[in-house]
Image (spheres, helix red, strand yellow):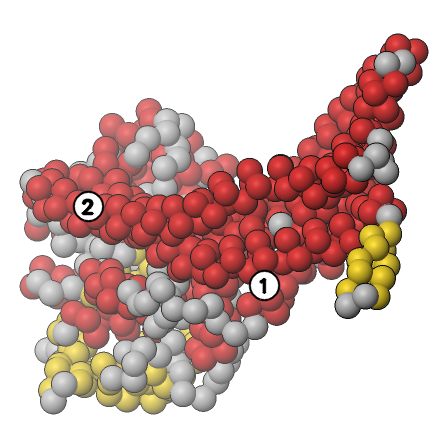
């Protein structure tokens, strides 16, 4: 089991600072765009249209405020109390209208965000938790480590922030369209004398606003470019730290028994040092960005009034028009400044999208290179024509092509009890190949159709659920009746657990390792399979307990076929055949050890 973790650690590294892969937008739309074409597309499109309509409503608020502002300041300039009171009433109506728009927009947007996140999470989970991909992907090269963090956190950021950014971009585009027209009309015509020729420049304030925003955006993009890489690096460091904490939680009992807290603290300190470096790098990049943003925001508030003030001083426009012009200028520049205002958020969003895309791309590549091809990989099939487990020219390799087991042929008949010993890595790879989760190699493995197969690993997986659900796993808890569960628990030597069938606990921590292996046998008795694969499933039991459980299995499941990985003499008496995987010249060959007697499995009278 440890080999997978080591390989994962070796392959999980990689540059976190590289440029995004080509075709980012196309990759993102191919992954996430299916939400708008799925079974709920009518509802999704209805929400999308509603969000757009409400965004238009949001844009109408500053337009109304702009028109209201002109009339208010004109009323103040004219000292008209009647018009002033009218403006107070109108602003009340605008407030009510704004409240309705804002609340409806929030509800529609959040429903769309959660719906998209739910769809994307289900899609990635289905791809990841299918046909052993979650196990196989750990051996694939590439930057797709910490899939739990990518699915839980990065998908959340991807969906929520994409709609937030899309909404703000749409809002700014509509705002720009609205106030471009207003600013053009308010600018009037500017007369400029050049070389003795008088030129008329209509809409000059619009051109000033465009030039001002273009200069600001260009400077911000140049200053903020390092921010994208800084955010990406930080998120990678954060994910590594979260994953290490999760591993300590999952292996707390083992770490406590080995008194490994000091080593884990050192490892976590190293990883958190990466988090701090990522934070410092992001802070440095943000500081450079904020120096410009702070200056730009203050100048943006004063600049439009300074530009329009000469016309007011000259008496060509009223105070109301001056304030309306200043607001229109500000709104136009604000809409054009979307890249400046959102660059840090875009950087964070893109980093999360890349992490999700890397996981998705790795799963697609796994399907293409391993699961969906026939030649060059181990085929595992079910056949109505076979009653035996047949290995035909099966060779087992590492993912990088290194040979693990040389090609061999083997037949295991129904009722056989086969002990497999020798090279530990090769034996585990062999069981993984039979289970269909180790496709690297060649040849064909054929299992009888319509038979129940049960794999019992060295440490049974015990979900954090009721004991009844643990016994039924991966089936529903309701499939295990009280009497059946009580009989199985008593048979394997765990009668004290009968009263806790519907109790929920962390069973992998509550139970000792030997008791967890006993619970694995209880699960076996409940499932009653036709083919049983035991992977060092009794290594923590003392010899009398091991003998008791193996004898119980023979008595309760006399017709089941048994294949056992084991490396101690106490197993020999319970198996009729013995296979040895011997390592020679860097690879392993399989041979069958001659037995003096071939005892038949016991039968029930």
Residue 409 appears left or right of 31: left
- Residue at x 52% of width, y 52% of height: 343
Q: Is residue 475 left or right of residue 242?
A: right
Q: Are marks 2 and 1 in contact (CB under 8 Å)?
A: no
Q: Position of residue 175 (x, y in %)?
A: 76, 45
To which residue does mark 1 refer?
Answer: 28
In the rendered view, would you say 159 is above or below 325?
Answer: below
* 16 over 309 or under it: above or below: below
Name the one closer to the observer, 352 or 152: 352
Q: Quadrant of residue 472?
A: top left
> Cα distance, mark 2 to mark 1?
33 Å
Quarter of the N terminus within the rendering: bottom left
- Asked where in the image residue 61 lies, by quadrant, the reply is top right
**Residue 473 x, y percent position in the rendering:** 41, 46
Residue 94 can be seen, yes or no:
no
Residue placed at 44% from the left, 49% from the top? 289
User: At numbered mark 2, what does the secondary structure look like: helix, strand or loop?
Assistant: helix
Q: Quadrant of the C terminus?
A: bottom left
The disc at residue 334 is: none
Q: Position of residue 537 (x, y in %)?
A: 21, 55
Neighbor class of circle 2 (other Cα within 10 Å; few <14, some 14-19, many 20+) is: some
Q: Secondary structure at mark 1?
A: helix
Looking at the image, which residue is at 28% across and 65% down?
13
For label 2, the residue is: 268
């Amino acid at each position: 089991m440890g080999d997978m973790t080591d390989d994962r650690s070796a392959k999980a590294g990689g540059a976190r600072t590289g440029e995004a892969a080509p075709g980012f937008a196309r990759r993102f739309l191919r992954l996430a765009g299916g939400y708008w074409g799925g079974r709920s597309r009518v509802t999704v499109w209805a929400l999308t249209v509603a969000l757009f309509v409400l965004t238009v409503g949001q844009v109408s608020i500053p337009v109304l405020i702009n028109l209201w502002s002109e009339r208010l300041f004109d009323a103040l300039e004219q000292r008209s109390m009647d018009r002033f009171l009218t403006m107070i009433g109108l602003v009340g109506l605008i407030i009510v209208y704004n409240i309705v728009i804002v609340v409806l927009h929030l509800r529609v947007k959040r429903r769309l965000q959660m719906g998209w996140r739910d769809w994307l999470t289900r899609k990635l989970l289905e791809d990841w938790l299918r046909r052993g991909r979650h196990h196989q992907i750990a051996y694939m090269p590439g930057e797709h480590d910490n899939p739990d963090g990518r699915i839980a956190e990065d998908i959340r950021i991807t969906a929520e922030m994409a709609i937030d950014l899309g909404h703000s971009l749409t809002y700014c585009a509509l705002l720009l369209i609205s106030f471009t027209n207003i600013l053009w009309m308010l600018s009037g015509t500017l007369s400029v004398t050049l070389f003795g020729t008088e030129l008329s420049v209509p809409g000059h304030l619009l051109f000033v606003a465009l030039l001002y925003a273009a200069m600001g955006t260009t400077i911000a993009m140049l200053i903020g470019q390092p921010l994208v890489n800084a955010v990406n690096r930080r998120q990678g460091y954060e994910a590594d730290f979260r994953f290490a904490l999760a591993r300590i939680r999952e292996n707390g009992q083992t770490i406590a028994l080995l008194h490994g807290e000091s080593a884990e603290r050192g490892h976590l300190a190293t990883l958190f040092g990466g988090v701090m470096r990522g934070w410092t790098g992001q802070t440095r990049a943000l500081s450079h960005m904020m120096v410009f943003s702070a200056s730009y925001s203050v100048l943006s508030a004063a600049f439009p009034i300074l530009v329009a003030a000469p016309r007011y001083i000259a008496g060509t426009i009223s105070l109301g028009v001056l304030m309306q012009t200043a607001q229109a200028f500000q709104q136009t520049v604000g809409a054009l400044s979307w890249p400046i205002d959102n660059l840090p958020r875009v950087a964070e969003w893109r980093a999360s999208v890349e992490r999700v895309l890397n996981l998705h791309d790795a799963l697609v590549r796994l399907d293409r290179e391993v699961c969906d091809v026939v030649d060059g990989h181990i085929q595992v099939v079910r056949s109505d024509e076979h009653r035996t487990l047949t290995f035909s020219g099966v060779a087992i390799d590492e993912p990088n092509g290194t040979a693990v087991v040389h090609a061999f042929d083997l037949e295991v008949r129904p009722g056989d009890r086969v002990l497999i010993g020798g090279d530990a890595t090769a034996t585990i790879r062999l069981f993984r190949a039979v289970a269909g989760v180790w496709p690297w190699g060649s040849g064909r493995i054929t299992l009888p159709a319509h038979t129940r197969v049960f794999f019992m690993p060295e440490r049974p997986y015990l979900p954090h659920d009721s004991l009844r659900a643990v016994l039924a796993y991966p089936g529903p808890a309701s499939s295990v009746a009280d009497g059946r569960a009580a009989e199985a628990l008593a048979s394997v030597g765990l009668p004290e657990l009968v009263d806790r069938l519907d109790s929920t606990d962390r069973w992998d921590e509550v139970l000792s390792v030997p008791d967890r292996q006993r619970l694995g046998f209880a699960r076996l008795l409940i499932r009653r399979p036709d083919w049983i694969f035991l992977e060092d499933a009794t290594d923590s039991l003392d010899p009398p307990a091991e003998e008791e459980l193996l004898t119980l299995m023979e008595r309760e499941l006399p017709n089941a076929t048994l294949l056992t990985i084991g490396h101690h003499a106490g197993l020999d008496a319970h198996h009729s055949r013995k296979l040895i995987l011997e390592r020679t010249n860097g690879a392993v060959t399989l041979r069958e050890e001659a037995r003096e007697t071939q005892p038949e499995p016991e039968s029930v009278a």
